[in-house]
Structure formats: C-alpha cells, structure tokens
C-alpha cells in the first residue's frame, strides 16, 4: 500500500501571489480579498486526505468454469466499501491475466461508494487454452480534493482462475484409449451375426456356417454368409496450414488453433466409440513429432498402432506449436511458450504462428496425392479445416473421387465485423457448399456456438448413431 | 498550472507503476481526451464566464471553433490533403478572429476613454485600455482553451503541427504580397492604384529585372559586388544541380562511375569558387560606401582591369545563362526526386498547407473590395480624434499606392502569421511545461479566465464576475485535469459520472464559500479607511494568517 500526496493544489500559490500583486497595482480591495480564493483552495487541498480506515472488499465471479477455446466468459467483480466513511473516488482494476483479451466491458471502473455500498464491474474475456490465474485487483482511493492518493493491491475473493483444457493434449500422459472392436456394419457378407446371404459351399468353409436345413431338404451344400461387421477405419486430418492461422481479433484463437482443438475432441469421441482412428496434420513439421513421418512430411499416428493416443497427442502438440499458441510456461498442463497475441488491423484477421515452410501450390498437390496413398481402403476421412483457402476443397474432391467418405468440420473465424471479414465469410460459405456438393458431410462450428452439437452433426454416423 | 502526474500505466498520482494493469483491456484509447462530463464542465464554465467577463464573446467563440477545428484537421489521418488545405485556409479565419475579438474591445475602450480633459487622466485611461485589452485577450484564450478541450484536440503535438502548417500557409500570401509590393517600392508610387495586370506584370518582371541588373550593370566604375554575387550564386547553384541531377541513372556502369568521379571533382572546385565568391562579396560591400575615385587611388594599376572584368558582358551573360540552367535543373530534379520517392497521398499532404495559402490568396483577392474598406473605416472611426484621421490618411495612401488587393493580401498574410505565432506560443509554452501537455485545453482556459478576472477590476469589472471568474478558473482546471486522469485510468468510455460530479461539486462548493468570504472581506475593506491603526492591525493579522496558511498548505 502506498500513500501519496500529489500537491496538485500548489498551483494556488502563484495565483495567490499574482492576485496580491495585481491588488497592489490597482489598489483594489476586491483583488486583495480575492486572493483568499486560491489560498482557500491550497488549504482545501492540504486538508483533504484519504480516511485512515478506508477499506474496500472485492469479489470475483467467473461465469464459465471450463470454457471451450474462443468462448466468451463473463467476469463479474463486486466492489464493496467495507469502511464507515464515504469513499468519493475508488478506482478498481481487476487483475486480468495478460494472455486473455477483454472483448467487452472493462476491468476498470471508477466508483463513488457510501459506507457498505457495493458496485459491480462486468467484462468478458475470450478463453484460451491453459490455466490463467487472475491477479489481485489494484485499488486506488482518492480524497475529495484528489490531493491524497492511496494505492493498494487487494486480494480478490471468489474465483481466482480461468481454466481451458484440451481433451487430449492436457490429459495425463499415461492415459490410453480403450481399444474396442468395431461395430460398423458393412454391405459385404462374411462372418457375423446378422443374416446376409447364402452361396455355394466352398472347400474350407467352416462347418458352423453350412446351411444344414438346405442340405436336408435338397441335398445341396450351401454356406450362410452374415453381414460382416468391421471396425471403422477413420483418418482424422487436421488442417494447420498457414492460411488458417488467422483470428478474427487479437486474443481470440486462430482458425488452425480451433481446428486442432476440434480434432482432439473428435479423436477422443471416435476412439471412445471404438473407431480405429488415425491422425495426421497438414502444415506441421513432421520431424518435430514423435509420430512416424510418412512421405510428404506427414506425421501419422496410426490407429492400429499400440500407442495411438501417445502418437496422436504428439501430432496435436505439433499442431498447437505450429499455429503459435501454447499454454503459459508456468502452466502445469503444458510446457509451451506464452501465447502470441499478434497485431491486427481493422480489415484483416490477426495472423499468428510461424509461416508454412515454403509449401506452394504444387507442394500442396503433392501432399494431397501422398495423403491419398496413406489412406486405408474405404477409410472415412474427417477433415477439420477453417476453409480459408481452396486447397481443402480440392482435397475433398480428390478424396471423394477415390470413393472415400469425407466429413468436413469447419470452425468459423471470419466474424471480424469488418469488410474484409465479411468477404472472407462469403468465400468460406462458398467452400462449404462446394465440399457439400462434392458429397462430403459438412459441419459448421462457430466458436460462440456449441462444439458438442457440431461434433454430433459430423461424426454420429461413425460412432454408431444416426447422422 | 500543473496537474497530478499520470504514470505510464495510466495511473495518476506519481506513485509506482501498477503491475496489475491488464494489457488486454480493449478500452484503452487516446490518453489526451478528458471524460465527457469534464469536457462539458470545462466548455460550459469557460464560455459562460467569458461571456460574463468580457464583451464580444461571440467573436471569441467563432475564433475558438475555427482554432479547434484546425487542430482537429491537422490531427486527422484520413483525407489528410484536403484536411490540411482546409486547416491552412482556416488559419486566416483564426487570425481574423483573434484580431477582431480583441480589437473590437480595444476600439470601444479607446473611444470611451479618450479624449481626456486633463493630463492626469491619460495614465488612468491608458491603464484602463491596457486592462481591457488583457481582459479581452484572456476571455479569448479562455474560450479557445475551453472549446479546444473537446476531444482533447489541443496538445503539444497538434499545436506544433498547426504551427508548422500555419507557417507554410503564411509563406504563400507573404511571398505574393512581397512580389506585388516590390516593383512599386523599387519604382516608387505613381499616385494611381495599380491594376491587377500591372501587379502581375511587375511581379513577373521582378526576377527579370534582377537578372538584367546582374547581366548588364549600369553606371561607370567597378561592379565587383554584383560580379562576386553572380559568381558565388552561380557556383553554388551549379554544385547543387550536379548533386541532384539524375544523369547517373541513365548511364551504364562504367560511364556512371566516370560521371560520378568527374562531377565530384567539379563540385569540389565549384564549392571553392562559391566560397571565394562569398568572401569577395563581403569585401566588395565596401564598394557601396567608397567613392570610385578613392577606389582608383587605392587600387592603382589594378583598377582598370578590375573595371573591365566586372563590367564585361561577355563574362556576365554566360554566368547568368549557367545560373538559370543550374536553377532549372536543380528545381526540376529535386521536385522529380521527391515526387518519385513519395506516393501521391504524401505529395498531396505536403502540398496541402501551401494550397491552403493559395486559398487564402484567393479569398483575399475575392473579398478585398467588400471587406477592406469597411474594416479600415471601422478602425478609423473607433480611434479617438486625430488618431482616426491619421490612420485613415495612412491607410488611404497605402491603398492608393499598392492597390486594395495587395493591401488585403498583406493583411491576410499578417493574420495567418498571427495565427502561426499564437500556435507557436501555445506549442512552446506546452513544451517548456508552462502549460500542462496532458490537459492543455482546460489549462489554457483556466489561465485565460484567471488573467481576465485578475485584470477585470482595472477595466471597471464588477465584483461578482471577478470572483466568479476566479472560482471558475480553478473549477475549469480541476475538472479538466481530474477528468483526464479519470479518462486514463478508467478509459474514456468508462462510467465515471458519479465520482466526477462529487469531485467537481466539492470544488465548486469550496469556491463558492471562498468567494463569499472574499466578498465579505472586500465589503469590509471598501468601507475602511486605510492607514488607521485598526485597519493596519487587521491587515497585519490577515497577511500573517495568509502566509501561515499558504506555507502550511504547500508543505
């Protein structure tokens, strides 16, 4: 706590002397007596002080305990005059973590409080990955004449942190995905439980599948085929390329960052439902991950490998590193560097992260071709991309032409409120329509909306529900 | 006046920086804008009390609006070129407003104070006129400061930028006025008002006449001075022309290097010649005061050759030709170079102040017929007795000799120059700390009100406006400084109404009480007889109490 006297009313001294001088010059009783005005102000400033027992209590409430990245979280701070004297000037600044952007309201407020009176300060921040502890509130009290100032740091009661966890990257390292057998029914006949068809007996067919009734009736040997049930082979492709590393405004996650987060949630849902899920990412340095690197510098966490979850975690960590957002250094959930706020203009979204290492159009085509070569036959591809350029559309068309079912989950980061953002939004909607026309399922995820709903729309058909 | 010191973290009070100020607060904006309530208080009190203290506040208000608009225009980033043109044009309005708002009061005061019946009254009347002038100036400054508090447009940066703009704008009408006036001055007035064609012809012919005198000197004897000037100017111009000419850009590598080497060597020689020419010029000034016969006696056998050389047309004409060519190359190359390096917007913005000067010239040219005569007549009528007649006679001679358009142009240049001076004074006082840079507008308004109130009794001001003006000056300064600190700490969009009203209300309340006590004291003092033992004792006690209070307050 610091107490300072500003001496702002010292200006009255030369004013007093000037009036006395003018009074003598003009021999004016009015001017001589008027010297009392600045003199009185000097005394007023000297006598005015912050009460010794002045005391302020501050409480904080965070509206959402576990928000998703990009979600707005409202913080309400209640300031109460806990002393017995009137506080004419109370200035409060809540200790917002530096990494969180205030998007509405203000954590600052100037109040005038009677004894026992309370007032609230409300503002909203955008959640980011990591755990962000709030700092103490700064409170500055001024006397009535503003000549005495007391500044103190007040411990805030109530919520003291904002935590935004990623499902996979922030889980304990030893956690593994339970391996369940697949239950996805196919149109081909084979072993199973549901009748599919009969065919002529071939040597070597198991005896349990011989149609004994038919043999008894007609004497012909036939083999019963059941609807074959295979494990779903899904390949999750996260688009972390440079065009997607833009945010609608500073402090808000980028499109690539949201794609990484949605990819982790999808991976968790798919593996939890027993789907064999491989993970790869576009626009990241494959050598920087623990996962095997396939041709085209694609990190590949194979769903059939023993440590798929560990490998997938490595790929997702590479995505987060590439898009430029990492948890705080003191964050127990991660080991990255502080988030890069970046700069912005009125018309352009904020760019962050390192540039894609010189991958041009031909390089992208080559990667798409090489990605196709990695895909298991009939694998379902789930592409998570902000769709801020035409490459994902070309990739989807190529995949569909090869017969791969494709689902596209796209986080929307074009809502900048600017003309540029509006144009980018129009182009993105055109791309969504283009991939839908190519036969892909599409799911549009607005960060302010529910990710659960977007995921349900996109992958329910893969985990056994109805799409 | 000084205010509480705001720290870089936006906190006032001069204490340690606050580490907990969030960097992600999106409400941080311009640090120089007082809050809305503070702005309303500053504008209302300063303008209201200015109206109470002085006459003709309407003119001061118009001046203030034009001044504030000019500051806002020079601070704009968008449409910068037209904004600067408009701001340059407004410099004429601002200057005219200052002169009118103070001049009207001075003329009225002069008309009422003079003539005097006795010699002893001259001093009293003079003091009254001087006081009224200071009051009018204070009222104008208070109004200007109050209006310029809106949006915090008056700052050291904007004042400096406006000074620069006004000076550039000032150059155009001043140069034109000088070009129009010079031929008449050189030839002497012929008693008839010159036509526009004659003015333009004279202005265009001036450089030619000058070059003619350089090429063909008139009169007998030596012409060392003009010859030395010609040599020095030609060498210097050629040096600059060689430096900026884009010849190397059109040559190939080897030739380019060769050209650079040779021109560099030539420039060294030319600089030496220019320096020698300069030295010779300073020596040759003696030619103006020394008789040719004396010179011939001193120089002896050298006089003849010197006369032949310095009068040689064969030498002077090539030198004049080279001078003209070098000037053309210099000006064109420099203009092209700047144009190529700068984009169109920058070029337009650079030209904006000068285009404003052109606009001032156009305004002066279009309105001189309807503005100049009434203005001069008004001043002549306002001046007492013989002063008015003398003024009318002198201005009549000027108008007849140079033409009303030229006189109007010179007056317009003077008004723009006055604006530049006012802006320069504000910028300098802000820079040296005499005016607080963080609340320049409110501080200027407070100083204006204080000055007007302090000098108002000398101009016959009544007690109530004087006391109200003094209290108002502190209220204006306090509200502005407090509102600015609030705006910085809570953000300009923050809800600060209640604390501000409480604070300003307290300041006004204290001021009213003090004014009441001062009024009571003044009533006692007016009735008292000075010099008696009782009044001296009371005065002594009051002075001691005042000193004690002042020292205690300042500790």
Image (cartoon, rainbow, N blue to C red):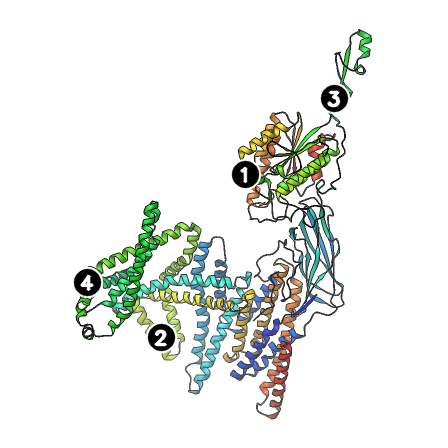
Using the image, name the chain to which the residue with label 1 belongs.
Answer: A
As drawn, the residue found furthest toward the bottom would be B533
Camera-nearest residue between A169 and A408: A169
Q: Is residue B144 left or right of residue A264?
A: left
Q: How many marks?
A: 4
Where residue A428 appears, as percent x and y from the top left, is 59, 37
SS for dot 1: loop
Query: Are tags 3 and 4 found on a single chain?
Result: no
Q: Select label 2 or label 4 by which is in front.
A: 4
Q: Is residue A98 left or right of residue B134?
A: right
Q: Distance between the residues labelled 3 and 4?
A: 117 Å
Q: Mark 3 points at which residue?
A: A228
Using the image, name the chain to which the residue with label 4 belongs.
Answer: B
Classed neighbour count for the residue bearing mark 2: other residues with Cα under 10 Å, few (<14), some (14–19), many (≥20): some
Q: Distance between the residues labelled 3 and 1?
A: 46 Å
Q: Distance between the residues labelled 2 and 4?
A: 49 Å
Q: How far apart are marks 2 and 1 (CA)?
A: 80 Å
Q: Select label 3 or label 2 by which is in front.
A: 3
Q: Name the residue under label 1.
A: A358
As drawn, the residue found furthest toward the top would be A219
Please report the residue visible at 70 percent of the width from the left and 35 percent of the height from the top: A267
């Amino acid at each position: 706590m610091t107490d300072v006297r500003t001496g702002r009313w010292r200006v009255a001294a030369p004013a007093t002397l000037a009036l006395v001088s003018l009074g003598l010059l003009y021999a004016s009783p009015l001017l001589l007596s008027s010297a009392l005005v600045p003199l009185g102000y000097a005394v007023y400033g000297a006598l005015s002080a912050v009460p010794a027992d002045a005391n302020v209590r501050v409480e904080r409430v965070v509206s959402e305990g576990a928000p998703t990245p990009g979600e707005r979280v409202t913080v309400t701070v209640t300031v109460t005059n806990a002393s017995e004297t009137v506080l004419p000037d109370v200035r409060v600044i809540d200790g917002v973590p530096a990494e969180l952007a205030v998007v509405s309201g203000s954590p600052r407020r100037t109040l005038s409080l009677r004894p026992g009176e309370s007032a609230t300060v409300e503002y909203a921040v955008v959640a980011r990955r990591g755990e962000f502890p709030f700092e103490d509130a700064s409170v500055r009290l001024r006397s009535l004449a503003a000549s005495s100032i007391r500044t103190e740091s007040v411990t805030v009661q109530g919520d003291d942190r904002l935590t935004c966890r990623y499902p996979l990257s922030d889980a304990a390292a030893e956690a593994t995905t339970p391996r369940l057998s697949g239950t996805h029914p196919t149109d081909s006949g084979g072993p199973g439980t549901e009748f599919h068809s009969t065919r002529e007996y071939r040597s070597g067919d198991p005896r349990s599948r011989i149609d004994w009734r038919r043999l008894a009736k007609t004497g012909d040997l036939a083999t019963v085929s059941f609807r074959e049930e295979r494990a779903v082979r899904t390949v999750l492709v996260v688009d972390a390329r440079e065009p997607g590393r833009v945010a609608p405004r500073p402090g808000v996650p980028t499109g690539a960052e949201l794609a990484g987060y949605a990819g982790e949630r999808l991976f968790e849902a798919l593996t939890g439902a027993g789907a064999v899920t491989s993970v790869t990412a576009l626009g990241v340095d494959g050598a920087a991950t623990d996962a095997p690197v396939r041709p085209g510098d694609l990190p590949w966490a194979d769903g059939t490998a023993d440590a798929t979850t560990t490998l997938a975690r490595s790929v997702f960590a590479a995505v987060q590193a590439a898009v430029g957002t990492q948890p705080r250094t003191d964050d127990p959930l991660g080991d990255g560097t502080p988030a890069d706020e970046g700069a912005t203009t009125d018309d352009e979204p904020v760019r962050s992260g390192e540039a894609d290492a010189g991958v041009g159009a031909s390089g992208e085509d080559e990667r798409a071709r090489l990605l196709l070569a990695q895909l298991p036959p009939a694998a379902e591809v789930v592409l998570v991309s902000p769709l801020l350029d035409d490459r994902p559309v070309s990739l989807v068309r190529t995949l569909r032409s090869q017969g791969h079912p494709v689902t596209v989950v796209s986080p929307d980061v074009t809502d900048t409120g600017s003309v540029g953002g509006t144009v980018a939004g129009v182009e993105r909607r055109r791309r969504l329509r283009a991939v839908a026309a190519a036969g892909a399922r599409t799911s549009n995820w607005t960060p302010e909306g529910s990710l659960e709903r977007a995921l349900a729309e996109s992958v329910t058909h893969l985990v056994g529900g109805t799409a | 006046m000084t205010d509480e010191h705001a720290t870089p973290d936006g906190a006032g009070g001069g204490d340690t920086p606050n580490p907990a100020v969030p960097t992600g607060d999106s409400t941080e904006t311009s640090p120089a804008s007082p809050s809305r309530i503070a702005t309303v208080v500053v504008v209302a009190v300063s303008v209201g009390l200015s109206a109470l203290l002085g006459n003709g506040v309407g003119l001061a208000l118009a001046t203030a609006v034009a001044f504030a608009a000019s500051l806002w225009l020079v601070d704009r980033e968008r449409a910068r070129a037209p904004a600067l043109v408009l701001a340059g044009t407004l410099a004429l309005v601002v200057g005219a407003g200052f002169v009118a708002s103070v001049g009207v009061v001075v003329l009225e005061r002069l008309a009422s104070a003079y003539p005097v019946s006795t010699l002893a009254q001259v001093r009293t009347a003079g003091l009254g006129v001087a006081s009224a002038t200071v009051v009018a100036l204070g009222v104008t400054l208070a109004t200007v400061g109050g209006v310029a508090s809106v949006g915090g447009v008056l700052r050291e940066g904007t004042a400096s930028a406006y000074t620069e703009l006004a000076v550039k704008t000032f150059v155009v009408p001043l140069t034109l006025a000088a070009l129009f006036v010079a031929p008449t001055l050189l030839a002497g007035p012929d008693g008839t008002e010159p036509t526009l064609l004659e003015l333009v012809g004279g202005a265009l012919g001036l450089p030619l006449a000058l070059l003619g005198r350089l090429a063909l000197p008139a009169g007998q004897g030596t012409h060392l001075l003009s010859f030395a000037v010609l040599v020095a100017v030609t060498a210097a111009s050629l040096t600059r022309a060689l430096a900026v000419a884009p010849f190397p850009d059109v040559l190939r590598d080897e030739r380019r290097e060769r050209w650079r080497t040779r021109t560099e060597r030539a420039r060294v020689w030319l600089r030496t010649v220019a320096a020698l020419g300069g030295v010779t010029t300073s020596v040759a000034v003696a030619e103006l005061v020394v008789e040719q016969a004396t010179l011939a006696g001193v120089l002896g056998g050298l006089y003849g050759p010197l006369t032949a050389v310095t009068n040689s047309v064969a030498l002077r004409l090539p030198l004049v030709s080279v001078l003209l060519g070098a000037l053309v190359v210099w000006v064109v190359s420099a203009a092209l170079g700047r144009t190529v390096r700068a984009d169109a917007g920058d070029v337009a913005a650079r030209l904006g102040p000068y285009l404003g000067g052109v606009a001032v010239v156009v305004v002066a040219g279009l309105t001189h017929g309807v503005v100049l005569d009434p203005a001069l007549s008004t001043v002549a009528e306002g001046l007492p007795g013989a002063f008015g007649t003398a003024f009318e006679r002198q201005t009549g001679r000027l108008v007849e000799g140079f033409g009303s358009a030229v006189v109007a142009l010179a007056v317009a240049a003077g008004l723009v120059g006055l604006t530049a001076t006012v802006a320069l004074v504000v910028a300098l006082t802000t820079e040296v700390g005499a005016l607080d840079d963080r609340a320049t507008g409110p501080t200027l308004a407070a100083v204006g009100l204080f000055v007007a109130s302090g000098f108002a009794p000398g101009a016959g001001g009544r007690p109530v406006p004087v006391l109200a003006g003094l209290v108002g000056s502190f209220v204006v300064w306090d509200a502005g400084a407090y509102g600015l600190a609030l705006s910085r700490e809570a953000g300009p969009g923050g809800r600060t109404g209640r604390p501000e009203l409480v604070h300003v209300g307290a300041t006004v309340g204290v001021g009213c009480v003090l004014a009441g006590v001062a009024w009571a004291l003044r009533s006692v003092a007016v009735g008292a007889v000075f010099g008696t033992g009782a009044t001296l004792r009371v005065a002594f006690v009051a002075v001691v109490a005042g000193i004690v209070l002042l020292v205690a307050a300042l500790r």
